[in-house]
Image (cartoon, rainbow, N blue to C red):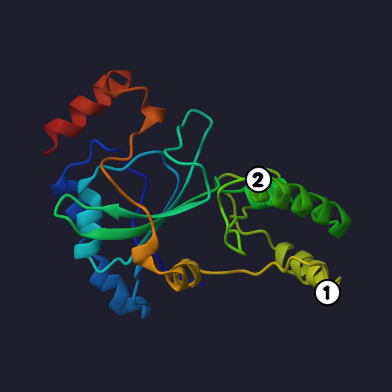
Amino acid sequence: ISVTALPMHTTPDCTSMQWTQALQDLDIIRKLSGSKITTAINHDVNGQPWTVSSLMLDSNIQFYMTGINIHFGGIPFERPYAFRWETPDGRTLPSFVGEHYSLFSQFFFTYENDTKKMHQGVQEYIGRIEKSNWKENFVVLTATNPPLYDNNCPDANLADLIRRYNEEGHEQVIRFVTPEMIYERICRKGIDNLPKHAGDWTDYWSFGCASTARELKINRRAK
């Protein structure tokens, strides 16, 4: 179990002040939870302003990961992809673009509670990964609770399904991992060896600020 930063989904329209307010209670949460909170996650959300990279580093966040929803979204790189996000002030935030949330459950048919069906999904996904630019010996997927996938409680049957699958002795071993563990694996490769990119994460889902003119007006008046 891991506690991560970022309290809610946002848009690239958030100002530095709004982001500072969103991150200002991290030290209180660290004290209450006993967690160092060194990682941040956004799943589903499709964009972040460039300034948030600096603010996360200022808030002692070491690693940022996301799983962009491609329903109306756009992916800046072929995923999975690890890189250094260069901040406006020249620092870098190690970042990871992973698959959309729930795709572990969907790719591996967890709702069927069948290890044979699960293995079929694993093989199909590994086949796609082997044709991609991802050359590491691990992949990261996020599980949710079928059949709804969204806004649901944890999948109570998942741990037993994974245990049964691993006991069958397949080449691939499935583990529950935290963002900190993913960051540790990426660090083994050498953070300085990762490609570096700078700039905003464009929010394709919003169809531009004009698509939510009323909400944008309220947001700007609230500053």
Q: Amino acid at mark 2?
A: Lys
Badge 2 density bin: few <14, some 14–19, many ≥20, Cα 10 Å: few
In this rendering, the answer to whether 118 lies above or below 219 is: below
- Which numbered disc flags the more N-terminal residue, 1 or 2? 2
The disc placed on residue 7 is none
Q: Nearer the viewer, mark 1 or mark 2?
A: 2
Counting from the top left corner in percent of width and height, residue 203 is at 35, 33
The foreground one among 84 and 50 is 84
**117 vs 218: above or below:** below
Which residue is painted at 14% across and 54% down in the image?
A: 89
- 142 vs 212: above or below: below
Q: Which residue is depicted at the point 34% across and 62% down?
A: 5
Q: Return the residue nearer the eye: 144 or 141.
A: 141
Can see residue 146?
A: no
Name the quadrant containing residue 76: top left
Neighbours of disc 1 within 10 Å: few (<14), some (14-19), many (20+)? few
Q: Position of residue 106 (x, y in %)?
A: 70, 46
Give the residue type that dot 1 points to: Glu
212 horizontally vs 18: left or right = right
Left or right of residue 218: residue 171: right
Can residue 15 be seen here?
yes
Compute the Cα span from label 1 to label 2: 28 Å
Q: Residue furthest front?
A: 193
Residue 29 location in percent, x, y? 30, 71
Which of the 4 quarters of the picture holds residue 90? bottom left
Residue identified by numbered label 1? 167
Image vertical order of residue 117 relative to residue 33, above or below: above
**Residue, disc 2:** 131
Q: How many marks?
A: 2
